[in-house]
Image (tube, rainbow, N blue to C red):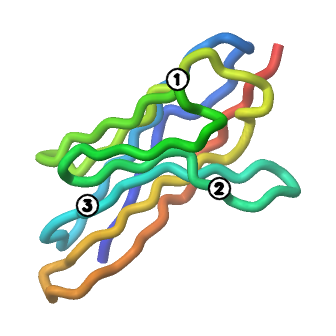
């Protein structure tokens, strides 16, 4: 079994910063892609940013230049540094991992989500 545990959400004023972390644990052989998604009330879940094991990144247009995704492969951990936050960034943020376990099969896992609220 695999667990993705997120941390770092909270309430922040517009223009502020937050750093999210997501640590994967379990019988993991390797993790290919790790990413962050978000879901605002009444909206569909959307990709925020993703990063491969080799460090290639992809960002939603709405966060380019403000958010930075990074990962520590040795710790199976992905981070999302969020700067210049806007009220429209308010959402539940979910970690996602595309990985291979020791049964040599591919799996996709989600974290439980962490709330980010941007408000004055």
**Few, some or many residues within 10 Å of mark 2 (<14, 14–19, 20+):** some
What's the CA distance linking mark 3 and mark 1? 30 Å
Identify the mark nearer the N-term, 1 or 2.
2
Number of numbered discs on residues: 3
Residue 21: x, y in percent?
Answer: 40, 38
- Quarter of the image for residue 71 reads top left
Report the disc number at residue 65: 1
CB under 8 Å between callouts 3 and 1? no
Is residue 17 left or right of 29 when viewed as pictured? right
Residue 13, above or below 50: above
Nearest the viewer among 6 and 81 is 81
Q: Earlier in the sequence, mark 2 or mark 3?
A: 3
Mark 3, residue position: 25
The kind of secondary structure element at disc 2 is strand
Mark 1 lies on a secondary structure that is loop
Using the image, determine if residue 42 lies above or below residue 26. Answer: above
Mark 2–mark 3 distance (CA, rounded to whole Å): 24 Å
Q: Who comes first in sequence, dot 3 or dot 1?
A: 3
- Residue 48, given in percent of the width and then of the height, sits at 56, 46
Which x, y percent locates residue 2? 31, 70
Q: Identify the residue under disc 2.
A: 46
């Amino acid at each position: 079994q695999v667990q993705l545990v997120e941390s770092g959400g909270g309430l922040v004023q517009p223009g502020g910063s937050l750093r999210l972390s997501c640590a994967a644990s379990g019988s993991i052989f390797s993790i290919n892609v790790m990413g962050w998604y978000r879901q605002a009330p009444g909206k569909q879940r959307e990709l925020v940013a993703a990063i491969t094991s080799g460090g290639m990144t992809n960002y939603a247009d709405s966060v380019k230049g403000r958010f930075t995704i990074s990962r520590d492969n040795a710790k199976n951990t992905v981070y999302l540094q969020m700067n210049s936050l806007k009220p429209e960034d308010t959402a539940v943020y979910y970690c996602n991992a595309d990985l291979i376990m020791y049964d040599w099969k591919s799996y996709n896992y989600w974290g439980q989500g962490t709330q980010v609220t941007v408000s004055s």
